[in-house]
Image (tube, coloured by chain):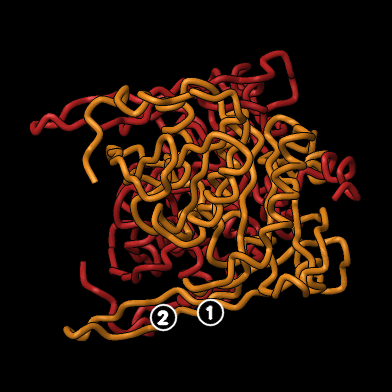
Chain colours: A red, B orange
Amino acid sequence: MAFINKLDLVFDNYFMSDKPLILVTNDDGIFSPGIKHLVEIAKQFGEVVVVAPDKPQSGMGHAITINSTLRLEKTNYHKTTIELACNGTPVDCVKMAVNNILKKRPDLVVSGINHGSNSSINVIYSGTMSAAIEGALEGSPSIGFSLCDYALEADFESSTQHLKKIIEFALKNKMPKGVCYNVNIPKLRTEDIKGIKFVRQAKANWVERFDERKDPYGRSYFWLTGEFVNFEPEATDTDEYALSQGYISVVPTQVDLTAHQHLMEVKNKL
Amino acid sequence: MAFINKLDLVFDNYFMSDKPLILVTNDDGIFSPGIKHLVEIAKQFGEVVVVAPDKPQSGMGHAITINSTLRLEKTNYHKTTIELACNGTPVDCVKMAVNNILKKRPDLVVSGINHGSNSSINVIYSGTMSAAIEGALEGSPSIGFSLCDYALEADFESSTQHLKKIIEFALKNKMPKGVCYNVNIPKLRTEDIKGIKFVRQAKANWVERFDERKDPYGRSYFWLTGEFVNFEPEATDTDEYALSQGYISVVPTQVDLTAHQHLMEVKNKL
């Protein structure tokens, strides 16, 4: 890898085609198996550009780099027109790609495939989904993909046909500005995946437990661990339910965090 | 400062009172002027516990520490019953306080006062607001406070009476589970603040510009900069509008990111 000195260099053989421009990123790092698989799928739909973190960035949420600087390094791992490893967060990667590298807005931003679930409340902690959300904020249709299997040797092949169907749908039926899709894939063999369901984000949370240990100097340190709790296990229109039934869940996602109902209740009370 | 070896030590003189338990955190770091001011206000309403980052964590969004460990150090800066500096993110601080330090759920979580605006889309990048959101997810009424002035010597005094009114309101009128308040304060003198308005999050975004420079070795690095763009400057029910008119804006905030309207449109299309 070599540091990029003149970004223009990367434009050399750029945009020879009029195929859709697809930006691929992730949060597990540019060399992880999940993004490798997603790039291969994306290549079947358009001109692929990869701008992804140079190291794992799980749990980074919508973090951006404002007190430090960003670097880009060229890689040649995915054999795409442009591929760059960035030392920043997943959101930095999307901002960098859209505003500093690409000459036109991507027709699609895809993020993942994440090694692990990003269903329900996980959307807010997820670097994968934050990259997709940022893509949508930047004005591109965007999809975050996550496989409910944390293993590095997870089977990303089993859902390939379904993921292609979702990408095809997104390219054809433009989602509204600011909306992206949060796609979660159950850990199942191809023949056991029942299909794809559009659903809503389940109400859920993590109940944390901090694992306290002693370092060699006798001082305490803590590992964040926790247990996932679905607050509405009986609801059948959620991502958690769809996944539990063997479906791939797709939650249309946007960042209006306004609690509209409560707003109406308190509107003139202060 | 000394590393915490036995967390029980901090419980020594803990809960002598039956006043409301108030957790204070922020993203600018435990020694910043904004949190100092918020702690002083919080003390007037209850028993205050401070668990805040040991260094600035601006722009961290909802990041959590999962690939590294967390440490706590006792401080005595705020003269509260418990105060701990944590090496993690704002969200880590809230998780740590609620699940590992406190023996009961806080009656209120307050975060800030942030040095700089967290209105509209900034909510998703903001460590201050992510801490408040995490407080709400953990089941406590929570408020994030931000002053639209980035200066370290900003005037936090001018809005004190208004902030007390908002805290009083939150303690009396419990917000629904999972909802918190995003409070932004215009940079104005006391006499110029017109009042407090409950409003919705404005649709807005940042248009980024990457400032490219050369390091002493001739290699490029980038600073993320940008310009804020309000997509609906004519709307009068948004936080941006309220602030522009001299009001303190309060957006009831929750993390259902589901794009419900689009979900209805695409529901059975795959």
Q: Residue at x 66, y 65 (%)?
A: A139
Q: Chain of mark 1?
A: A
**Drawn side of residue A260 relative to residue B138, left or right:** right
At 61% from the left and 50% from the top, the residue drawn is B144
Q: Give the structural element (helix, strand or loop) at label 2.
A: helix
Residues under numbered marks 1 and 2 in contact, where contact means CB atoms less than 8 Å apart = yes
Pointers 1 and 2 within a single chain: yes
- Can you tell which mark lies on residue A103? 1
Q: Is residue A55 visible?
A: yes
Task: Say which element carries label 1.
Answer: loop
Q: Quadrant of residue B29?
A: bottom left
> Which one is earlier in the sequence, the residue at label 1 or at label 2?
2
Kind of residue at badge 2: Phe
* Residue found farthest to the left: A216
Neighbours of disc 2 within 10 Å: few (<14), some (14-19), many (20+)? some
Quadrant into which the C terminus of chain B falls: top right
- CA gap between label 1 and label 2 equals 9 Å
Would residue A44 be visible to someone looking at this image? no
Residue wearing tag 2: A11
Relative image position of residue B137 (x, y in whole percent): 60, 33
- In this rendered view, identify the residue nearer to me: A4 or B178: B178
Q: Residue at x 40, y 76 (%)?
A: B223
Tag 1: amino acid: Lys
Residue A198: assigned label = none
Foreground residue, A49 or A117? Answer: A117
* Residue A7 shown left or right of residue B182 in the figure: left
Kindly identify which chain the residue marked by label 2 belongs to.
A
